[in-house]
Amino acid sequence: MDLGIYAHPWDLRALPAHGGLRRLADLGFRDVALAVSYHAGRWLTPWQPDSRVRFLEDGTVHYRPRANYGRLVPLPSCEVREGEPTPLEWLCEHAAEHGLRARAWAVLTHNTRLGEQNRDCCVQNAFGDAYTYSLCHGNEHVQCYAQAMVSDLRAHRGLHAIELEAILSLGHRHSSHHDKNSFPADAFIDVLMSACFCDSCIEAMATMKVESAPLGHDAIVGLRRKIRVLLEARFAEDCMAAVGKKASPQQLVERLRAELGPAALALLGARTLSLMKLLLPMQKLGVGAPILCAQANYDSLRGNAALPFPIVGGVVQECAMTVYGEKAAEVASALPHLLAANGDGVVPPRPVAQRPSLRLCLHPRAPQYQTDDDLRLLRDLCAQHGIHAVSIYHLGLLPWRTIERVAKAFS
């Protein structure tokens, strides 16, 4: 099993005082995934020498953009300094000296800085509200931006892989700054609140065939109205009402069709069509170029950044499945369903033989993980389900004792 770890530039800068890259290699790590495009955040970093609480720059990149990004131009971070190697260049140069492989970890559609500057490129819900933290993956400017980023990253010599996060637009459930509402999580409501009606998505929906004919703009107006009516009905209810049972992706699709009619399939199909338009140009990496990895899940409908695992198979060489908030026992019950998932009911899944290799991304913190038995259970699950690699989140967030403990359990 390959063991990897996520890191930010300041983690690498502080690493020499803690044994450097050699220490990671000695612990059994094989991959270091460096954040090259990231969003705002407040992080408690327990072993950083200069600050314990760090506020991240919003929507910046830790490399030098050179490709044609079109309208959405990346902003280099303060870590990209004149006359010095960028953090990614440094990692690509030095990782192999210690038997490590360099990965570029890029967040694509989650960018509040670009979203606030380009609101028309953001997800627009049924009420017309723009989610400025979420660029719409169906927008041509966003697709150009994402494809240019991959082009820039693949030009780095010594880079083993490019791992893409937030390829699909983030929906309502993904928290914004100081996110607040009075309603408990509800998968169906989250789907409705995450449906995008920006100009690009409306055009994509209009071309989708429903009952052998294109949906058309009048039907989209009716679809949007139905979604607003359903949401207004929920908003009028008592927010202390009991939460319904968890629904599988297939059950959500069935309910969408029951509530919204045949147009629901056009809504889902347009999302998938836009996803493939964004991803397919990235597939042409060439011989010897970095492998392409997508963070994916079997549930592409919820208000987060999950990708439909069966659909991306054959487009990327690796899928990374994040289980940051689940206990080992919950992962054990979910994995069989995830690996056997049939997508969103719109696009047929790839045959198993064409599916990419698998990587599990773990945030080993309490209360989800408190004993070595929890870690060993997850290790055994990976072996049972053919998962070839585990990545640990995150070098800067975890105490060294935790990093050592996890590395021992998996290596």
Image: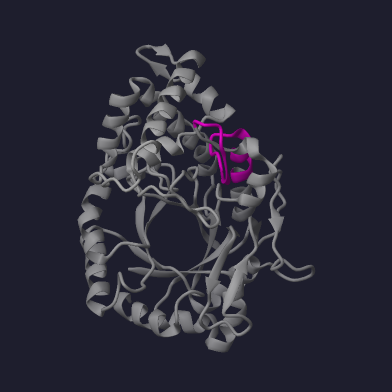
Q: How is the image coloured?
A: one colour
Query: Can the viewer see residue 383 in this picture?
Result: no
The residue under the point 30% across, 69% down is 368
The percent coordinates of residue 54 (x first, y second) are: 60, 73
Q: Quadrant of the C terminus?
A: bottom left
Which residue is found at the position 36% from the left and 25% from the top?
265
Q: Quarter of the image holding residue 35?
A: bottom right
Write down the quadrant of residue 212 in the picture: top left
- Whole-percent x, y for residue 166 in the image: 49, 49
Task: State whether residue 316 is above or below residue 374.
Answer: above
Q: Residue at x 32, y 68 (%)?
A: 1
Of 350 and 285, nearer the camera is: 350
* Whether residue 75 is situated above or below residue 83 in the rendered picture: above
- The number of numbered badges drawn on the structure is 0
Query: Where, by quadrant of the figure, is residue 69 drawn?
Result: top right
Along the line of sight, which residue is nearer the eye, 209 or 319? 209
Furthest residue in direction top, as rendered: 213
Q: Position of residue 123 (x, y in %)?
A: 54, 38
Q: Is residue 369 visible?
A: yes
- The residue positioned 61% from the left and 55% from the top of the image is 153
In magenta stretch: residue 136:
yes
Check if residue 127 falls in the magenta segment: yes
73 horizontally vs 256: left or right: right
Q: Identify whether 57 is placed above or below 307.
A: below
Residue situated in front as seen by the camera: 356 or 115:
115
- The single residue placed furthest to the right in the displayed view is 83
Instruction: Give above or below for 178 relative to 362.
Output: above
Q: Position of residue 395 (x, y in %)?
A: 48, 74
* Drawn side of residue 226 relative to residue 161, left or right: left
Q: Which span of residues is magenta-colored?
A: 126-146
